[in-house]
Image (cartoon, rainbow, N blue to C red):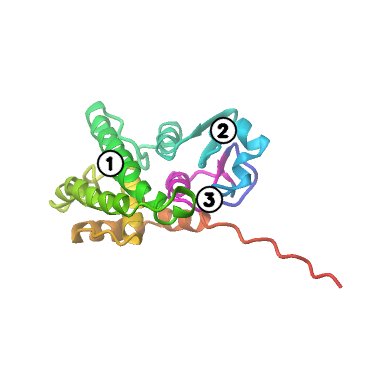
Amino acid sequence: MTGSPSRLVLWGVSTSRTLRAAWALHELALDYDLRPILPRSGETKTAEYTQLNPRQKIPLLQDGDFTIGESAAIIAYLSDSYGTDANRLVPAEPKPRARWREWCFFIAMELDATSLYIMRRHGALKHIYGEAPAALESSSTYFQGQMRHVEAALADGRPHLMGDRFTSADMLLTTCLVWAIDYKVPVAPACHDYLERIVARPAYQSALRANLPREPKQETARG
């Protein structure tokens, strides 16, 4: 986002996790500065960044002298700190908040970490982590099995996982569905319809653009 420097700074671009953090900033209409560093690069291992985040991972959010990593935690922090009744991404009441937390934990663990990231490690990143065809197949099968819970929740025509209210659970699920489709994992029609609605949100589209890797600097020709 443009404008004068702000106290919110987001580090990282190009991944589904950095997209989530940027998406939250855009949903909440917050001004921020972007530091477009890339994963698995020397940019996450510099002394400056390591001091901010010893785990050397992205995304990372700075809010003044406070820093927080992990995309789901960043979204929740931004919503709790800056959300309004009109745009907050986390339910306020205890029981809806508990159900929201259940969805977030389920998506982050069962769909993302246990399924899709295993496929990424041994698919697109096999040059780093090695080939494992059995792991790819079993992860895809596991993902499809776990998706029955999502399909059941969307079968009644509700617009979002939590009903009428859009929350960060939808943000986590959307990035996982995009990821799964990219990996050619079968996804039910109800999930495709849901995804089409969510990715049409203006904040998603603007965050998608913000999350693009930066263009490399052009070398000046020398005579």
Residue 126 position within the rendered picture, expressed as x and y whole percent measured from the top left: 44, 53
Cα separation, mark 1 vs mark 3, equals: 24 Å
At 40% across and 53% down in the image, what residue appears?
Answer: 131
- Which of these two is toward me, 210 or 121? 121
- Which of these two is toward me, 121 or 93? 121
Above or below, comparing residue 193 to residue 27 in the picture? below
- Kindly tell me whether residue 200 is visible in this rendering: no
Q: Is mark 1 in CB contact (under 8 Å) with mark 3?
A: no
Tag 3, which secondary structure?
loop
Label 2: few (<14), some (14–19) or many (≥20) C-alpha neighbours in 10 Å: some
Q: Mark 2 belongs to which amino acid?
A: Asn
Single out the residue that lies furthest toward the bottom. Answer: 223
Residue 1 position within the rendered picture, expressed as x and y whole percent measured from the top left: 56, 51
Q: Mark 3 belongs to which amino acid?
A: Val
Above or below, comparing residue 52 to residue 209 in the picture? above
- Kindly tell me whether residue 212 is visible in this rendering: yes
Write down the residue under mark 2.
53
- Which of these two is toward me, 177 or 222? 222
**Quadrant of the rendered image containing residue 106:** top left
Tag 1, which secondary structure?
helix
Decide which of tag 1 and tag 2 comes sooner along the chain.
2
Write down the residue under mark 3.
13
Q: Is mark 3 in CB contact (under 8 Å) with mark 2?
A: no
At 32% across and 55% down in the image, what residue appears?
Answer: 133
Write down the residue under mark 1.
110
Q: Mark 1 belongs to which amino acid?
A: Glu
Above or below, comparing residue 129 to residue 79 in the picture? below
Residue 30 position within the rendered picture, expressed as x and y whole percent measured from the top left: 50, 43
Residue stretch in magenta: 9-34
112 sits to left or right of 70: left
At 34% across and 49% down in the image, what residue appears?
Answer: 116
